Amino acid sequence: MLKAGDTAPDFELPDQDGNPVRLSTLLTRGPVLLYFYPADFTPVCTREACVFRDLQPDLERRGATLIGVSPQDSASHARFRAHHRLTFALLADTRKRIIRAYDCDGPLGLGVKRVSYLIGRDGRIVEAVSATFRVARHAAVARRLIDKTS
């Protein structure tokens, strides 16, 4: 896992609508909370996405962008996003290039680790957390950002 102080690898991936999203572009607007999750429509991933959905308005008021990344394709992300009324972008990393760049690949290349990175406007990682089943630890990163910038 990357750690605080590391430079976040820049990337461009398609969102749920097939539109390209580039990290460096997002960072011009403010910090980015980038989270990696194993799969759409799984119980823990759904709970995590819905917790982040509920925190997103406060993140936006603080100038932060929330982005989810998993290996499913854009069509799966579009269904997941619509079904759970998610309002943030879900990026498709079907080849797991970015997942690997952020050291979120599962053991032996199977699956994806649940990891959240808070990336500052300067492109450096401010905070990183990895917790497979503890969604609250990931949400705490968002809450600290909301509290810090209020």
Image (cartoon, helix red, strand yellow):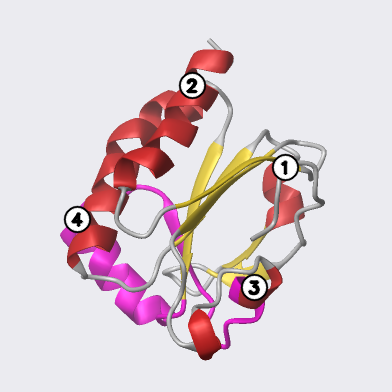
Q: Nearer the viewer, mark 1 or mark 3?
A: 1
The answer to if 3 sits in the magenta stretch is no
Q: Is residue 105 left or right of residue 8?
A: left
The answer to if 91 sits in the magenta stretch is yes
Q: Is residue 108 left or right of residue 86?
A: right
The label on residue 84 is: 4
Q: Nearer the viewer, mark 2 or mark 4?
A: 2
- Where does the image place residue 79, in percent across and percent down from the top left? 25, 71
Q: Disc 2 and disc 3: Cα gap in Å?
A: 26 Å
Q: Report the residue marked by disc 1.
A: 4
- Bounds of the magenta segment: 71-99
Question: Residue flagged by tag 3: what amino acid is it?
Answer: Ile
Mark 1 vs 3, N-terminal side: 1
Q: Disc 1 and disc 3: Cα gap in Å?
A: 18 Å
How many C-alpha atoms fall within 10 Å of the one at disc 1: few (<14), some, or many (≥20)? some
Front-most of 57 and 35? Answer: 35
Location of residue 46 with respect to 88 vertically, above or below? below
